Structures are given as structure tokens and as C-alpha cells.
Amino acid sequence: MERIEHTTTIEDLVENVPRVVGYLIDQGLPCIVCGQPVWGTLAEMAREKGRTDQEIDKLIADMNSKLVLKKSP
């Protein structure tokens, strides 16, 4: 996975960037391990949890810089 987008599914995130699970939990956005269904996108899940579009944009930018683009484990 090169980049996380608004349309990236939770299932793709968990499969391709497994460390995202802990990050999402830290951000108050539980995903598959907490019973959230694997279907749906990151943006949909964040909106369901009350996040604004600006908060979602920041979350995605942070995830891309900290999790996806990070070269070391």
C-alpha cells in the first residue's frame, strides 16, 4: 500500500498496514479487533465516530507519514 486514502477500506488497512490497528485504537477509532466490521472505508468509520472532515484529513495525513511512509518497522 503506497498511501492511505479516504476510500481505503478497513480490511485493506489491516491487511496491508497491520500496525494501523494500534494507531486507530489510540486515536479512539477501534477497528476489526474491537468488533468493527471489516467493510467500509476509513472515512466512513471516522465519520460514524463523530470526526469532522478536517479531523479525518489530518488523521489520514498522520497515518501516511507515520505508518505508511515510515521505512523502519
Image (cartoon, rainbow, N blue to C red):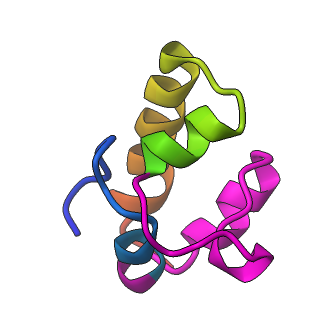
Q: Is residue 18 magenta?
A: yes
Q: Which residue occupies 56% across, 67% down?
A: 20
Observer-nearest residue: 60 or 68?
60
- What is the count of numbered marks? 0
The answer to whether residue 49 is left or right of residue 56 is right
Observer-nearest residue: 21 or 8?
8
Observer-nearest residue: 1 or 10?
10
Q: Is residue 2 above or below residue 34?
A: above
Extreme-left residue of the structure:
2
Image location of residue 21, percent across then percent down: 64, 71
Image location of residue 47, percent across then percent down: 58, 33
Image location of residue 32, percent across then percent down: 64, 77
Q: Which residue occupies 72% across, 81% down?
A: 33
The part of the chain drawn in magenta is: 15-41
The answer to whether residue 8 is left or right of residue 55 is left
Q: Which residue occupies 50% across, 51% down?
A: 66
**Residue 68 image-quadrant placement:** bottom left
Q: Is residue 73 magenta?
A: no
Q: Is residue 20 above or below residue 50?
A: below
Image location of residue 7, percent across then percent down: 28, 48
Q: Which residue occupies 56% across, 48% down?
A: 45
Q: Is residue 60 above or below residue 63?
A: above
User: Which quadrant: the N terminus?
Assistant: bottom left
Q: Is residue 43 above or below residue 4?
A: above
